[in-house]
Amino acid sequence: MKKIIIIIAQVILLYLFFQAGNFLQRLLHLPVSGSIVGLLLLFVLLLCRIVPLKWIEAGSVTIMSYLPLFFIPATAGIVNHLDIFSGKGLLLILILIISSVLTMAAAAHASQWLATLNGRHPGRSRWLGRRSIEKGKEI
């Protein structure tokens, strides 16, 4: 029961960051979505260790485990608009393949870059605030 309460409290905290991002987006008339602003705000606070990871970890893991369910309505909605894709199937497949390859390459390079940054400080992980026992192995 205690774990459920912790998860609910952490999801509420994540929601507050979402709302703070929406507020900042409206206040500053930013051209990006409020959810992105809230995510960046949370990221900066995590980097500065103002918000410890343990404050949001269980809630974010829970949300991530149910994330595929949030894509089902969007995918089902595409079925209602198949006429948009008629006659351009091969082009769409080509675009899908190229964009997937580019996304994977960008994610791989970003992961390597972050791993390199963490490798500069072998006794300490900068991003998660955790200590490692051996070089390259985090606990």
Image (cartoon, rainbow, N blue to C red):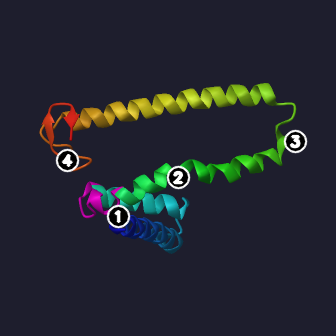
- What residue sits right under mark 1 in the picture? 3
Q: Which circle, 3 or 1, is nearer the viewer?
A: 1
- Disc with the residue nearer the chain's start (3 vs 1): 1
- What residue sits right under mark 2 in the picture? 66
Q: Amino acid at mark 3?
A: Asp
Residue toward you, 35 or 16: 16
- In the image, residue 96 above or below residue 77: above
The stretch of residues the image draws in magenta is 47-57
Q: Which circle, 4 or 3, is nearer the viewer?
A: 4
**Helix, strand or loop at disc 3?**
helix
Residue 58: quarter of image? bottom left
Mark 3–mark 2 CB contact (< 8 Å): no
Q: Residues within 10 Å of mark 1 (few under 14, many from 20)?
A: few
Give yes or no for residue 48 being in the magenta stretch.
yes
Report how far apart the C-alphas of labels 2 and 1 lie in the structure. Answer: 17 Å
- Disc with the residue nearer the chain's start (3 vs 2): 2
Residue 116: quarter of image? top left
Q: Which mark is residue 130?
A: 4
The answer to whether residue 18 is left or right of residue 78 is: left
- What residue sits right under mark 3 in the picture? 83
Q: Amino acid at mark 4?
A: Arg
At a point 25% along the width and 37% down the height, the residue shown is 117
Q: Residues within 10 Å of mark 4 (few under 14, many from 20)?
A: few
Q: Looking at the picture, how far across and down is residue 7, in whole percent?
A: 39, 64
- In the image, residue 4 above or below residue 137: below
Q: Which circle, 2 or 1, is nearer the viewer?
A: 1
Mark 2–mark 4 CB contact (< 8 Å): no
Report how far apart the C-alphas of labels 1 and 4 lie in the structure. Answer: 22 Å
At a point 24% along the width and 58% down the height, the residue shown is 48
At a point 38% along the width and 70% down the height, the residue shown is 5
The answer to whether residue 82 is left or right of residue 41 is: right
Report how far apart the C-alphas of labels 3 and 1 lie in the structure. Answer: 47 Å
